[in-house]
Image (tube, grey):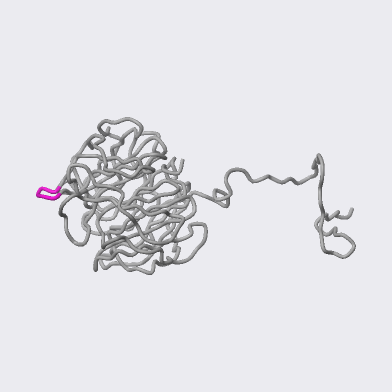
Amino acid sequence: MSDFRIDKITNRDGSAGTQIAGISTFSGTSGMQIPSGPTEYRGGRGRGFFGAGATPSQVNIIDKIEIATTGNASDFGDLDMTTNQSGGASSSTRAVFAGGRAPEISTINYVIMSSEGGGNDFGDLTEPWNGGKAVSDNTTAVWMGGEWSGAYQGDMKMEFTIIASSGGSSVFGDLSNHRVYSQTASFESPTRGFIGAGGGRNSPYYQNTIDFITIATKGDSQHFGDVSVTRKAAGGCSSTTRGIFAGGDTGSRSDTIDYITMASEGNATDFGNLSTASQFLAGTSNKVRGVFNLGDQSPGIVNTIDYVTIASTGNAADFGDLTGVRRFCAPASDSHGGLG
């Protein structure tokens, strides 16, 4: 029996190939599957990224993981900025990394998450920024918390960037009640962005507050509730409905994980514990599973990654390792809770 190859059929001069009109059926010993969903979602979503960081020397490394599996991270490429304490945000196709310190910078880089390779120049924040975090939907990244131009002073502004474009950023609004949220945790739903469990302006520098914004609408943040344990230097991640704060610094490293239901306002509830008490975490997710680079444990910086199932409660389990020890990473994902 011979094969009948319709891809080899052309018209007389070879300028056009097979055309199928009307109602057609297909049968055979093999089959085909028609792609579904938005084009930008095809091709294997579910990647998480950890960019830049400190070993303790600052680096420009981008690591990549497949969130639905467990295993070690692999090298994705390098940013064109060598820094730590940057912010990371992402749409379903593009991740953006902004700011950092040592020295303080305003640079924004972007990567195409479906490919391999390094960072590309995007533009700049309006001024140097470090120590904050970011939230995003599929359009807008908002840079929140941290330190602008090397100082915590006045109203602590937020800036935003349109992820699909290139260029700079513009002012979004201010954090409520002059809150700072340095070395903080953040996450998002498809409509709201959240920040909390960060360091304040004055000693003892630990905060229990959670603020939120509506990502599509510029304006100041509002108070949402409080975390269950007052701390800074936590990591955050989310599904479309539930947000998680993990670890942090209470004066010593913490293994606490707590969560909120993002559509309502109120205080966080106990979720479970990390595998080891940790601070300076970075977290991201694929809406089902949250993953955290644990950052800094006793006695020092680690490459450990933990994961949790966001819809349940319970303790974190080992996921694998980054390509090297790092803390202060900037996280991103092509399928986090803000992407619906």
What residue is rendered at 21% in x and 42% in y?
Answer: 176
**Considering only vertical position in the picture, is 137 above or below 146?**
above
Seen from the viewer's position, the closer of residues 118 and 122 is 122
Q: Residue 280: horizontal and vertical position, in percent? A: 25, 53
Q: Is residue 260 above or below residue 98?
A: above
For the magenta stretch, what is the residue range?
Answer: 201-205
Which residue is pictured at 34% across the width and 60% down the height? 98
Residue 74, position in %: x, y? 44, 61
Position of 38 compared to 234: left or right? right
Position in image of residue 49 (x %, y %): 41, 56
Toward the viewer: 42 or 318?
A: 42
204 is within the stretch colored magenta: yes
Q: Quadrant of residue 243?
A: top left
Q: Position of residue 144 (x, y in %)?
A: 28, 50
Residue at image point 28% right, 58% down: 328
Instruction: Find out whether residue 250 is within the magenta segment.
Output: no
